[in-house]
Image (cartoon, rainbow, N blue to C red):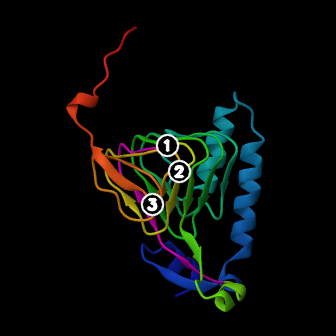
Amino acid sequence: MDIIEIMKQKKEYCSKHTDMPRTLQEKAKELCFKYNQTGPSEGEKRGNILKELLGTCHPLTFIEPSFRCDYGFNIHTHGLTVINYNCVILDTSPVYIGANAFIAPGVCLACSGHAVIPEQRAEGIGTSKPITIEDDVWIGANATICGGVTIGKGSIIGAGSVVTKDIPSGVIAVGNPCRVLREITEEDRMELNV
């Protein structure tokens, strides 16, 4: 099995930086650069770039520049996806983003990690684990989602949180490390004033 097939699997792996396909990362960097140079009125152009960049790109995928990713082909959107300014996705493993996902400014989704042993880290040995964001999730500003994490349907991740473990469905979770604060209930329903 080649490294690209390994990268596309929904399981953890360990590799050396020299194993990673540099040309694919160069393609993603070039497409991100082009995307980040588009104007606010160039929706069609942005959509075409995202279709070329992402592995699965739902037509209702909206990403505000500046956006960065490692490869792009490992990012999969599956419905309305709103990603705000300055998002980084380190997609060395698959990143699945469910329908009605709201990702605030400054969020980092990081599948990749480095070796714990300093000598191995210096040799460029690292790890990668997939990330799954289920439907109806809201991730607050400047949150970091680490590899191997699944965020359950309808949950909210508070601003500035660092998510290192799975978060169940229907909860508000906050902090570093991120922990469940409480369930979302009917009392959270808002009434429009306008």
- Type of amino acid at the residue the image marks with label 3: Pro
Extreme residue in the left direction: 186
For residue 127, what is the image quadrant?
bottom right
Real-space CA distance between mark 3 and mark 1, rounded to the nearest whole angstrom = 15 Å
64 up-or-down from 56: above or below? above
Q: Which residues are magenta?
A: 125-140
From the top left corner, tell me how far across and down residue 162 is, in percent.
49, 57
Foreground: disc 3 or disc 1:
3
Kindly identify which residue carries mark 2: 143
- Label 1: state its secondary structure: loop
- Say which element carries label 2: loop
- Residue at x-position 73% and y-position 63%: 27
Q: Which mark is residue 38?
A: none
Residue at the top extreme of this rendering:
194
Report the amino acid beneath label 1.
Answer: Gly
CB under 8 Å between callouts 1 and 2?
A: yes
Number of numbered callouts drawn? 3
Residue hosting label 3: 177
User: Mark 3, residues whose alpha carbon is within 10 Å: few (<14), some, or many (≥20)?
Assistant: few
Q: Is residue 135 magenta?
A: yes
Q: Earlier in the sequence, mark 3 or mark 1?
A: 1
In magenta stretch: residue 115: no
Residue 41 placement (x, y as % from top left): 69, 27
Kindly identify the residue that appears in the image at 48 percent across and 46 percent down.
58
Residue behind mark 1? 140
Spatial CA span between label 1 and label 2: 6 Å
Report the mark closest to the observer, 3 or 2: 3
